[in-house]
Amino acid sequence: MKRTLVFIVLTLTFFACKSPNPKPEKFLNEDEMEALLLDVQLLEVRLGDITGLPQDSLKIIVKANYEEVFKKYNITNKDFEENVHYYSYYPDEFEKMYSRIERKCATQDSLANLPKETK
């Protein structure tokens, strides 16, 4: 989760002083981008729990998992980066989007910690 937040903050900082850019060819609207970022955030949490693997194996797993998320949205890594770049020009909206994502993650964490029903 922290890596994703750091990536977004660095991206926002890097592009904050540049002139606005056109929408990416494979543009994701705000709802799609928010859903994608939520999936990326959840993926980061899952990947953060992996321990004891050699670095090269871990890289393969990370890459394959990101490709699955991107496939779900019919985009490539480049499309993802272009959309993050585009939204970085609208930091207020991007920050609001990310706040909603954090709330959704917190809700999912809370639900995951509920006791299981026994039948």
Image (spheres, rainbow, N blue to C red):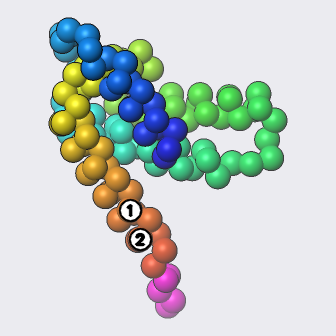
Q: Secondary structure at mark 2?
A: helix
| Callout 2 crowding tier (Cα within 10 Å): few <14, some 14–19, many ≥20 | few
Indicate the quadrant where residue 62 lies: top right
Q: Residue at horizontal 25%, vertical 10%? A: 18
Residue 65, compared with residue 88, is above or below; it is below
Mark 2: which amino acid? Ser
Residue depicted at x 64% and y 52%: 49
Looking at the picture, tell me which residue is in the foreground, 65 or 80: 80
Q: Nearer the viewer, residue 65 or 86?
A: 86
Determine contact: label 2, label 1, CB under 8 Å.
yes
- Kind of residue indicated by mark 1: Ala
Q: Does residue 99 appear anywhere in the picture?
A: yes
Residue 58 against residue 79 in the figure, above or below: below
* Secondary element at tag 1: helix
| Magenta residue check for 87 | no
77 lies above or below 31: above
Give the image location of residue 83, x and y in percent: 30, 22
Q: Is residue 53 left or right of residue 80?
A: right
Is residue 117 shown in magenta? yes
Q: Main secondary structure of the magenta part?
A: loop
Residue farthest front in this picture: 17
Q: Nearer the viewer, residue 54 or 88?
A: 88
Stretch of the chain drawn in magenta:
115-119
Residue at the disc numbered 1: 106
Per the image, the residue denoted by label 2 is 110
Percent x, y for residue 36? 34, 37
